[in-house]
């Protein structure tokens, strides 16, 4: 009883054919002695009919059938009467009149219904992941993921990239998060580490002359389990030799274009907008701006002079900023209570408060009301002119003597408003490059400079002379790809010059011995003619999540953490002493 | 100085063009004031000439250049004089007259020369893997590996397979070899295991209705480090629903055909020969026969009656076998000493000895000489007729009361002879399917039946009635793909019926509780309408190794074990108490 067709295949033109289908009982209902079965497989649904005059054996088998039984059936395709045609079903013009049914396997009572999308709570969905994966929702997402990965490989392979596997078992290297460690029984008392990324290996491959490398690579981070974070994740790891920043950027623009066209039939722009890190902070208060709506923040420094609001004056005098946001047409909608909620968002980002005013009056004679408007009496026209505000708009402000706090706090409010006001259109994909990142950032705790990204980033050429004298001004050849408010990829041109590498190590207070010990095998390799190189690593999980219009990574991974049999919580048969383990870990990572 | 062409691009038709190349100094020689440089990149070699009348700066830079310096150069393409054309080089018709050279990075003195294939010893090659990878040999193998993986994905994707990632962090399951364990710091005192294969997950995916799954998956085995064994390896993991054995076989035949055609331009037969496990043992003494030469073993039972050799008589009377091998035309070549070497091979496989005779005389009147010929006086014609032996042939025999010893020991001699006599043509690929494997094998130590492959193999239908009464006769729906004497893939149709699964557990003495505990999540999933399914998992490492004509896996992995920074031996900064670790492991695996 091997299938001749799938459950998505049959059309009116197949009428009269004898076919065999294999699949699952999606729904079954009896109507006037006739049984109607929706048979489901990966390819679709087909209506099967067991007529009231069916042979005794067929009738008996049909009576046994319950939801999610797996069956094979033979029957004849017949056109449905015009009134019964289902235009929402690909096979909706036909039905199969069953002549024989074989039960391949039975099903217990289901913990939840297999539907387009399961309504069960997440714990139950994870526990019965194998059933949750039968939903059209999960089937589509896993299929999308497969297609995205293949389109990626196709694009890169066509351009001469080799996919090269780098090891999972490596020596521990310091890369931000904690390494997972794997004790080896073979080598007495030794450990492997699992890679947080193939970063060092792909750089080595450039030294080896491979020129264009990629790998859809599994990576590991022993981080806290906040929300969606998975202990393992997948990235599209890319590295190229003899390239500059713009070569990497245009490769990725082409790659994303190919992926979206091949899988979603969406045409992306050939070039993504480029926003400097400084502008991103000024305009959106974040280096991963949501750009499905604009609503840029503005400089409100003029308000410190214009009005009498002391907090604005203090911020500017303290060397900080006043940031302003015009939210069009929502003055009436936003009650004091709703504005307080926005303020709570601003405070998460360390703002002291959220200033607000509402614009009323007429377009040519605007007035300001509520909030801090009393500090700007008689200045309504000037305020509205400068900010481009109109009656009905809500004005929001954050002022702080630390410029970055003013930006990020009001930026967070902007992002929240985008969601609250439904400004983020589904199915719309707004990419941007964030470029010209600072190379170093000041570590207040340790009173020293750290690299903002990683140690191997090439400082932009024009700053090479002033690396040591003015680290704070140095921009790196760093670039992030953002999509709909998420960081999708981070990359850089790397240092290939051992002397420059030593200078960077020194600035961040890394002794040559430390550098040697931790990255020795890379600096060692660089002694033998390293080419200029750079790369990037888009996250596959997040890309597919955004393409699928989801907000949780779990929706695009077949077996996320805490799905059955994955969580070590459920499956470790006995406790192990945590202190003992910590000691083992400490020995290896320190 | 960004390249306009690669070092493999330029042809006579480019003459006159000003070009920029980037690459490495492969060779440099000076001849009458002129410098000749072979510049190398991934794409090839180009001869660069710095003429004797070059500007001072160019001359000075050229003088600095040493092997493996990475440079950028600008120059004009010119045709070589006819006498200087190098037909062995793709760019051999031209040279580039350099006008400017920039040193991108310098190189220390090399530990070995970068050549087609490095002659350095393996330890040195591994230590400086990044340099070894620059050889044409390694570049080609890594490129081949990438192409094989892509061709695989292309073939399967075109046929509706989804590549689905299964987790690396799983619960420990018993699968033969030892699991690697990964302590989690997040979940106090818990471990993950790393998968030896995605076996259970791909079966779960079938339960989830994915129908056609594949994954080029990294797998892990904490096994002894004999020879070439890598702690991690890669397999092409495949599973399908609603299929029988022949569906899987023909899929793989098509896939191998596609891979070989796309990468090596080799046309494989559309169908591979199928040999039953019993026949493979009888004819070749192994279930992974080398078929680039035939030289099948024959049944020598008739010799027990025909002659007076007691060892033959004992073997037959003891229920065993006499196996015979005719080695054509080597009677003269094989001295007593060489035959003793063959015997030592037979003894490794537990043979008591290797019987031999040489055929001399004329074709119509053959004689037997040496070895055990005295036991067959006057029987030469009969012996030669039955075995199809001719004058000049060497006859070899192993007899044992255990039939399998006779077969495997003489089979090992056959395999060795294939190598010694050069019967295994390079570039020839002989595939075969080994089918009809026994389902169970007797465990003499524990006095019980074990499954020969794994617990989830479907016993062939005709044996279902006699599973318990005669386990030794049961054949499983198991199949191995062999290529040139290596097992390339192993697969089976799986059990999807929980009741049948319970019977198998019971036969191998696995209590229901044990089955539940170890495979609970699979048997649990099978309660909800599991489809019939089966699969296979060709090893990517071995496939590429055989395609590349190599005998070591290390030649086709960029970073094998013991290459720099991989071995935990070199990089673990401190010792950890082995006993402590063993305890930890025991707690989790028992």
Image (cartoon, coloured by chain):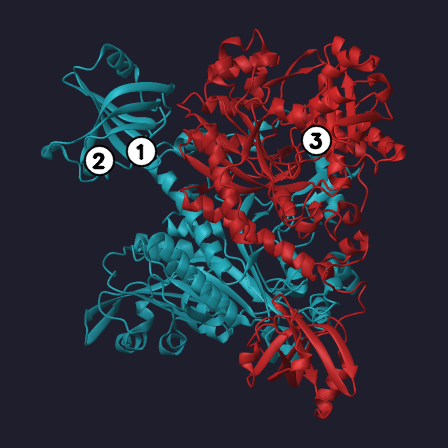
Chain colours: A cyan, B red
* Nearer the observer, A322 or A66: A66
User: The numbered mark 2 sits on a residue in which chain?
Assistant: A
Q: Is residue A295 left or right of residue A94?
A: right
> Label 1: how many residues lie within 10 Å, few (<14), some (14-19) or many (20+)?
few
Which residue has dot 2 on it?
A: A14
**Between A61 and A377, which is closer to the camera in this rendering?**
A61
Toward the viewer: A466 or A190? Answer: A190
Mark with earlier residue (3, 2): 2
Residue A292 appears anywhere in the view: yes
Query: Which label belongs to residue A537?
Result: none
Tell which tag, 3 or 1, sits nearer the viewer.
Answer: 1
Question: For residue A282, which quarter of the picture?
Answer: bottom left
The image shows residue B218 at horizontal and vertical percentages of 59, 42
* Chain label for disc 1: A
Q: CA distance from mark 3 to mark 1?
A: 56 Å
Q: Position of residue B305 (x, y in %)?
A: 76, 11
- Pick whichever, B220 or A519, lies toward us: B220
Residue situated furthest top in the rendering: B469
User: Which element is circle 3 on?
Assistant: loop
Establish whether labels 3 and 1 are both on one chain: yes
> Toward which corner of the image does residue A140 lie, by quadrant?
top left
Which residue is label 1 attached to?
A: A5
The reply to whether the C-beta atoms of the residues labelled 2 and 1 are less than 8 Å apart is yes
Q: Secondary structure at mark 1?
A: loop
Q: Which residue is mark 3?
A: A577
């Amino acid at each position: 009883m091997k299938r001749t067709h799938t459950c998505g295949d049959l059309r009116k033109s197949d009428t009269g054919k004898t076919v065999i289908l294999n699949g699952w009982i999606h729904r079954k209902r009896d109507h006037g002695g006739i049984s109607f079965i929706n048979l489901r497989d990966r390819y679709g649904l087909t209506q099967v009919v067991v007529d009231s005059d069916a042979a005794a054996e067929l009738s008996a088998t049909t009576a046994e059938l319950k939801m999610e039984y797996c069956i094979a059936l033979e029957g004849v395709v017949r056109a449905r009467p015009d009134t019964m045609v289902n235009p929402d079903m690909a096979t909706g013009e036909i039905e199969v009149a069953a002549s024989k049914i074989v039960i391949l396997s039975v099903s217990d009572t289901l913990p939840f219904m297999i539907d387009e999308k399961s309504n069960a709570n997440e714990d139950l969905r994870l526990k019965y992941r194998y059933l949750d994966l039968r939903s059209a929702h999960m089937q589509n997402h896993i299929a999308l993921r497969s297609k995205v990965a293949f389109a990626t490989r196709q694009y890169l392979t066509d351009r001469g990239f080799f996919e090269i596997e780098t090891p999972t078992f490596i020596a521990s290297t310091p890369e931000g998060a904690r390494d997972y460690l794997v004790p080896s029984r073979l080598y007495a008392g030794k450990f492997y580490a699992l890679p947080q990324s193939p970063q060092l290996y792909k750089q080595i491959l450039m030294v080896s002359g491979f020129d264009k490398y990629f790998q859809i690579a599994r990576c590991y981070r022993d981080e806290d389990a906040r929300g969606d974070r998975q202990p393992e994740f997948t990235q599209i790891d890319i590295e190229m030799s003899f390239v500059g920043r713009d070569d990497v950027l245009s490769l990725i623009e082409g790659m994303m274009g190919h992926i979206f066209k091949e899988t979603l039939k969406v045409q992306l722009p050939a070039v993504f907008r480029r926003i400097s890190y400084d502008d991103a902070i000024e305009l959106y208060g974040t280096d991963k701006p949501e750009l499905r709506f604009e609503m840029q923040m503005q400089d409100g420094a003029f308000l410190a002079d214009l009005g009498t609001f002391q907090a604005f004056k203090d911020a500017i005098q303290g060397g900080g900023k006043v940031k302003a946001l015009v939210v069009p047409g929502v003055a009436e909608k936003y009650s004091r209570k709703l504005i307080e909620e926005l303020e709570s968002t601003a405070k998460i980002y360390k703002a002291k408060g959220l200033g607000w005013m509402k614009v009323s009056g007429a377009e040519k004679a605007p007035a300001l009301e509520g909030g801090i408007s009393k500090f700007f009496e008689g200045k309504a026209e000037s305020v509205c002119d400068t900010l481009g505000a109109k009656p009905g708009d809500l004005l929001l402000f954050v002022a702080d003597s630390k410029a970055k706090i003013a930006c990020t706090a009001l930026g967070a409010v902007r992002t929240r408003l985008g969601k609250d006001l439904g400004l983020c259109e589904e199915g719309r994909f707004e990419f941007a490059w964030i470029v010209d990142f600072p190379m170093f950032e000041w570590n207040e705790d340790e009173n020293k400079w750290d690299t903002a990204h990683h140690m191997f980033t090439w400082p932009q050429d024009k700053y090479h002379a002033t690396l040591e004298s003015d680290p704070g001004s140095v921009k790196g050849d760093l670039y992030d790809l953002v999509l709909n408010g998420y960081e999708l990829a981070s990359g850089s041109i790397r240092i290939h010059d051992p002397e420059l590498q030593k200078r960077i190590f020194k600035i961040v207070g890394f002794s040559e011995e430390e550098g040697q010990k931790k990255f020795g095998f890379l600096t060692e390799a660089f002694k033998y003619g390293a080419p200029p190189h750079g790369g990037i690593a888009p996250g596959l999980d997040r890309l597919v999540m955004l393409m699928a219009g989801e907000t949780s990574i779990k929706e695009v991974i077949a077996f996320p953490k805490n799905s059955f049999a994955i969580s070590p919580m459920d499956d470790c048969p006995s406790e192990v002493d945590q202190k003992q383990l910590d000691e083992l870990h400490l020995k290896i990572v320190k």
